[in-house]
Amino acid sequence: MSTTTDVNVPSPTPPDAPRVSLGQRLQGLGGNARQYGIFGALVVIVLLFQVLTDGKLLLANNLAALFQQNAYVMILAIGMVMVIVAGHIDLSVGSVVAFVGGIVAVTMRDPIGLPWTTAVLVGLAVGALVGAWQGFWVAYVGIPAFIVTLAGMLVFRGLALVVVGETLAGLPPAFIRIAKGYLPSELLGYVGNMDALTLLIGAITVGAIVLTQVRARRALRRHDLHVEAAGLFLAKIAMIAVGIGVLTVILSFSAGGTPIVLVIVGVLVVVYSFLMGRTVFGRHIYAIGGNRQAAALSGVSTRKVDFWIFVNIGFLAGVAAVVTTARAGAAIAAAGQGYELDAIAACFIGGAAVTGGIGRISGAIIGALIMGVLNMGLSIMSVDPSWQMAIKGMVLLLAVAFDLLNKRRAGTQ
């Protein structure tokens, strides 16, 4: 009996690969897609107001003023995003700014008469103590942060009125220079009409960011973790470098060069980005915000983390108080009104999740810049302050709604 063997039997046709939508591809980028969107929104808003203000928004002196006027939002947003990521909220920071500013001013004036540097340290210590006080009630007594900080908003506003009265002026010029001064241009001189020191700082910043991003990408590849496409990565680096380069060149033409307060904010951004992204404490904050019970079961001391989060935002409120008081040239009992809302808005516009567990320092800073550009652009256009508040409120609402809609769409794909 003979058997016949078919040698030309076609191999099975592999099934068609499932089609991947653009939304799914963006979802695969994780939090990076959200950050790109936020940065893109900032660029669009800047360009829009540059056109609407006939090019006045990005004048050199206006750019320097943008950072000086909105430094307090950036500083408070750094601390607030950590609080929000952990699933809390802080409504007291504006009142703490007024109270600590009053303490700093009182200690510099007669009869105490401390040197301004010592007074600043006292203010930072008082801010940290205020944070420890509120952190104790939240972490160890178990009162919700909303209630504790709402009470703190009232308590410290009242104490600010007691300490300051109405206004305490006559502060040392060296202290005022913290918020209104610039790095000395005489150090490196000028390149044409551009401040050489500002150009050097910008170049160092771009180099540091590129190096950090490249090292982070290599680390992810080394551990076989997901990395964004090479083209997208290069586009991101180029976009950041060009953006910083343009701002640096414009700023170098300003009357003073680099504002001192911009350096303060830059140092804080670097330190806290490292803290949140590269330390155990930062990972614990994200773990608690993502799932508090699971974090506790895995050995995270949730009470200790909560306590130090509020100590930290108290300290940063002290930094913001020093900057605010220096910029005003006086301690004012009404200072800090609405600061907590500006900081919270900056965090949510910058991509922080209402439910906690998601948020970045860089996103909070971009959110603060969006708020600052809105403030300055609308002011240049002479828009009524009432309408400015309404517009900022709508921007906040739309930012949170956009984030929630994206999450729902990602969940249904």
Image (tube, grey):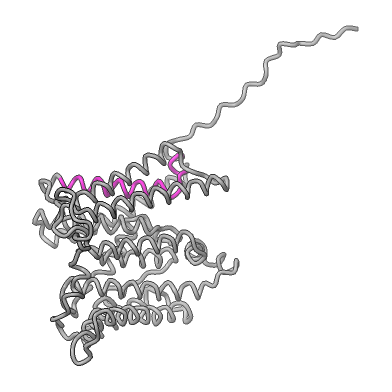
Residue 381: image location, x then y, percent: 10, 53
Q: Does the magenta stretch include residue 319?
A: no
Residue 103: image location, x then y, percent: 25, 84
Residue positioned most to the bottom: 111
Magenta stretch bounds: 25-50
Determine the image quadrant of residue 66.
bottom left
Residue 220 or residue 130, whichever sits in front = 220
Answer above or below: position of 86 versus 234. Answer: below
Q: Is residue 390 visible?
A: no
Identify the residue shown where x is 20% and y is 63%. Answer: 184
Residue positioned most to the left: 382
Q: Can residue 303 be seen in this view?
A: yes
Left or right, 381 with respect to 112, comes to left
Identify the residue shown where x is 27% and y is 64%. Answer: 73
Q: In which quarter of the image is the N terminus?
A: top right
Residue 146: image location, x then y, percent: 37, 73
Q: Does the magenta stretch include residue 26?
A: yes
Left or right, 147 with respect to 111, comes to right
How many numbered marks does the figure carry?
A: 0
Residue 408: image location, x then y, percent: 43, 48
Residue 132 or residue 233, whichever sits in front = 233
| Magenta stretch: dominant secondary structure | helix
Determine the image quadrant of residue 369.
bottom left
Residue positioned most to the right: 1
Identify the residue shown where x is 24% and y is 45%. Answer: 44
Answer above or below: position of 353 versus 91. Answer: above
Identify the residue shown where x is 21% and y is 88%. Answer: 113
